Image: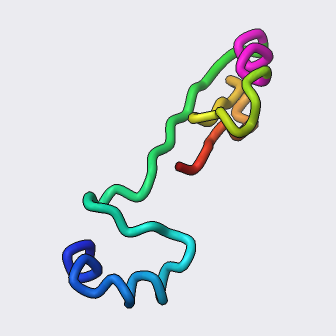
Amino acid sequence: MHAYYQQHPHRFRAEHPNLVLRDTPVIGRAMTFFVDQSMYGLLSRIPPEERQAAAKRRTGRPYTFFSEG
C-alpha cells in the first residue's frame, strides 16, 4: 500500500486526512513500561506533551504516556 500511495498521494490525503505520507511505511511508534507505584509516580511528572511511552502499574490498570509523533 505504501508504494501505491507514494504514486497516488492525492488518494492518501483524501483517505487518511489525519496522517502524513512519509518516505518510509512506518506510521508511528509506541512503547509500554510495566512499573510499580513509585516508578509510576515519577513517570507521572513528565508533561503529557513529552510522553513517549505507556506506563502500566503491575496491577494491570493502564495509564497512557503515549505521544503521537
Specify whether residue 15 is painted magenta. Answer: no
Q: Is residue 35 left or right of residue 6?
A: right
Magenta segment includes 40: yes
Q: Nearer the viewer, residue 16 or 9?
A: 9
Magenta stretch? 38-44
62 to 11, vertically: above or below: above
Q: Position of residue 19 (x, y in %)?
A: 49, 69
Quarter containing the N terminus: bottom left
Quarter occupied by residue 23: bottom left
Q: Nearer the viewer, residue 56 or 18?
A: 18
**Position in image of residue 51 (x %, y %):** 64, 34
Q: Quadrant of residue 27?
A: bottom left
Please indicate whether residue 1 sits to the left or right of residue 12 in the image: left
User: x, y percentage for residue 29?
Assistant: 45, 46
Residue occupying the point 65% across, 19% down: 35
Q: Main secondary structure of the magenta part?
A: helix
Q: Residue at x 73, y 24 (%)?
A: 46
Quadrant assignment, res 20: bottom left
Q: Relative to 16, is 54 above or below?
A: above
Q: Residue furthest top?
A: 38
Q: Is residue 7 left or right of residue 33?
A: left
Examine the rendered structure and indicate whether residue 42 appears above or below residue 2: above
- Between 57 and 2, the residue placed more toward the observer is 2
